[in-house]
Image (tube, grey):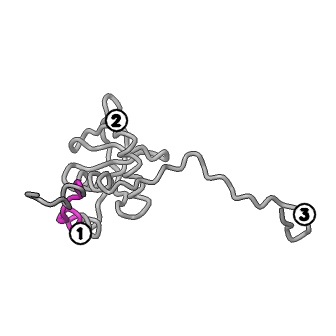
């Protein structure tokens, strides 16, 4: 324990991280899948202060995304790889809701194009073994 400016003892233990913090996605295949969907398909939409992520199925409808996809989209938004765009009214089932579109900046599109051009990571053991031996 240490003391503050007035000599009072204070606890110096680090503050606990919030329980609502999303885990970090470290799987590059997941990140690339999400970015490819955001570029090639109608993309994603984000709703409300809870930042619920939906996948757009066309210009008027959307559907819920699984948790792993939600975490990846939010991580990409927080890191600046995806940006939040304008407001649209879309339907998910029987509910119509105002949502913001998720946009892919040009810089992210260029990175994704380079990543897609790389040779996919496969089985390392099979590529290092001698053929014909």
Residue 66 picture quarter: top left
Q: Position of residue 84 (x, y in %)?
A: 37, 57
Packing grade of label 1 (10 A; few <14, some 14-19, many >=20) is few
What is the span of residues highlighted in magenta in the rendered image? 113-123
Give the residue drawn at x 77%, y 61%.
12
Packing grade of label 3 (10 A; few <14, some 14-19, many >=20) is few
When the figure is inspected, residue 49 is found, relative to residue 108, above or below; the finding is: above
Q: For mark 3, give the secondary structure.
A: loop
Residue 132 picture quarter: bottom left
Pick whichever of labels 1 and 2 is earlier in the sequence.
Answer: 2
The residue at which mark 3 appears reads as: 8
Q: 127 or 37: nearer the eye?
A: 127
Give the residue drawn at x 18%, y 63%.
119
The residue at which mark 1 appears reads as: 110
- Quote the CA–CA distance across marks 3 and 2: 55 Å
Give the residue drawn at x 33%, y 48%.
45
Q: How many marks?
A: 3
The residue at which mark 2 appears reads as: 96
Q: 84 or 120: nearer the eye?
A: 120
- Quote the CA–CA distance across marks 1 and 2: 34 Å
- 97 relative position to 4: left or right: left
- Which residue is at the far front? 133
């Amino acid at each position: 324990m240490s003391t503050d400016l007035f000599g009072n003892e204070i606890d110096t233990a680090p503050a606990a991280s919030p329980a609502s913090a999303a885990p970090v996605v470290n799987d590059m295949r997941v990140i690339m899948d999400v970015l490819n969907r955001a570029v090639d398909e109608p993309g994603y939409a984000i709703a409300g202060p809870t930042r619920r992520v939906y996948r757009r199925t066309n210009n008027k409808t959307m559907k819920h995304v699984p948790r792993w996809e939600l975490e990846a989209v939010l991580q990409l938004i927080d890191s600046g790889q995806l940006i939040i765009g304008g407001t649209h009214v879309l339907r998910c089932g029987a509910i119509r809701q105002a949502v913001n579109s998720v946009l892919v900046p040009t810089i992210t599109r260029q990175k994704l194009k380079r990543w897609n051009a790389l040779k996919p990571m496969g089985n390392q053991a099979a590529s290092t073994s001698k053929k014909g031996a």
